[in-house]
Amino acid sequence: MSESPRHETRIEPGPHVLNGEPMPEPPPEKSAGPIRPARGVQLDGKVAVVTGAARGIGRAIAVEMAANGADLALIDIAGPVSPASNAEPATPEDLDETVRQVRAYGARAQAIRADIRDIQALRGAAEQVERDFGRIDIVVANAAIQRWKPLLDMDDADWRDTIEVNLNGTANTLRAFAPKMVQRKCGRIVVLSSMQGKHGTKHASSYSASKWGILGLMKSAALELGEHNITVNAIIPGLVDTKLTRYEARLAEAIGEVTGHKPDHAVPSQAWDARAPVTALKVAWLRPEDVSPTAVFLASDAAAMVTGAEYEVTAGDSAKSV
Ligand SMILES: NC(=O)c1ccc[n+]([C@@H]2O[C@H](COP(=O)([O-])OP(=O)(O)OC[C@H]3O[C@@H](n4cnc5c(N)ncnc54)[C@H](O)[C@@H]3O)[C@@H](O)[C@H]2O)c1
């Protein structure tokens, strides 16, 4: 049986003439092109690099991209990051599990253990990915740590390491991989900020500051890289249940944010019952798989004209922010 040709639609085919002149339009390489089925999720033949891919949101983005046709280079430190991180470290086995989940979709997967604080290591990774995969189409700068501690109680590392990993590490990722995209005159970069990068956070000032900084970096990079046909956008998740957030003190903070009283001990159901009623969609937190589809859209051809933008995935916290 022969396949039917893929249907495409240009909704108002031109040329459109005004005052005797045809309306200029963006060239094909600067447009999402005609409507065609699944174009917002189609990543066939593309190569994506994801940092912080061993678990959580990074793993979800990697697997979601594989499910939609991309091959993946998976970067993670897969070990301890800093005493300033509240979360337990990811492991090499976690990274192997992401490789397994990506390959289950028939995609190529390569794990690279690297620290995003080390720009030379990232530049080496960029060379390696280009050599092994032939191209780099998509970079997702996702790796980060979080510190919950009052500002005046912070050790130097609580401030410095959070900024060094989250903000400087994200900048390193762009500085190491974007040159490969500049050479090819196309690319998609997605960075991960946070709703804590849209407002202040009591007891997480270094994290909040780093996530605000990532938005400034994203917008500046979008301005600079646009002429090379590279888009740069941010995903801003609300609270997501991952190892970054799944520990008692974070649950207590979540309860305190809503009720004004931070309990000494907290169980998950308490935190759910406190937070869920105040969100629009009545869930206290999202799953990583709720965030990853937005990354696929931003990486797709359909998002050709989206750059310098913030995409909030929050179950409704967005409705209460400016
Ligand atoms: N979970 C949430 O509620 C939430 C909310 C908003 C934003 N985010 C953001 O989403 C992203 C992913 O968070 P997550 O919840 O999946 O966290 P996670 O802790 O589950 O995963 C983070 C991964 O990054 C890796 N990593 C950390 N520092 C690294 C370094 N220096 N070099 C290389 N790899 C490193 C870790 O090993 C880990 O595998 C982060 O940018 C985070 O700030 C998370």
Image: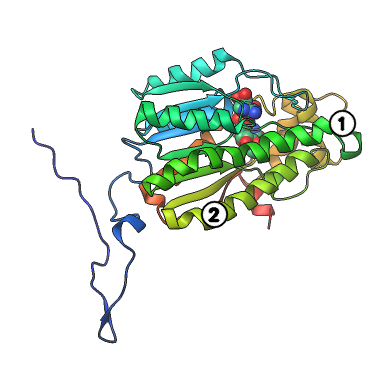
Can residue 130 be seen in the rendering of this structure? yes
Q: Residue 207 appears in which quarter of the rendering?
A: top right
Image: 64 above or below 81: below
* Outermost bottom residue: 19
* Outermost right residue: 152
Q: Position of residue 279 (x, y in %)?
A: 67, 44
Quadrant of the picture in which ligand 1 is shown: top right
Q: Which residue sits at x=36%, y=29%?
A: 133
The residue carrying mark 2 is 309
| Numbered mark located on residue 155 in the image | 1
Question: At numbered mark 2, what does the secondary structure look like: helix, strand or loop?
Answer: loop
- Camera-near label (2 vs 1) is 1
* Outermost top residue: 93
Judge from the rendering whether residue 73 lies leftward or rightward of residue 43; answer left or right: right
Q: Which residue sits at x=27%, y=82%?
A: 21
Question: Which image quarter is the N terminus in?
Answer: top left
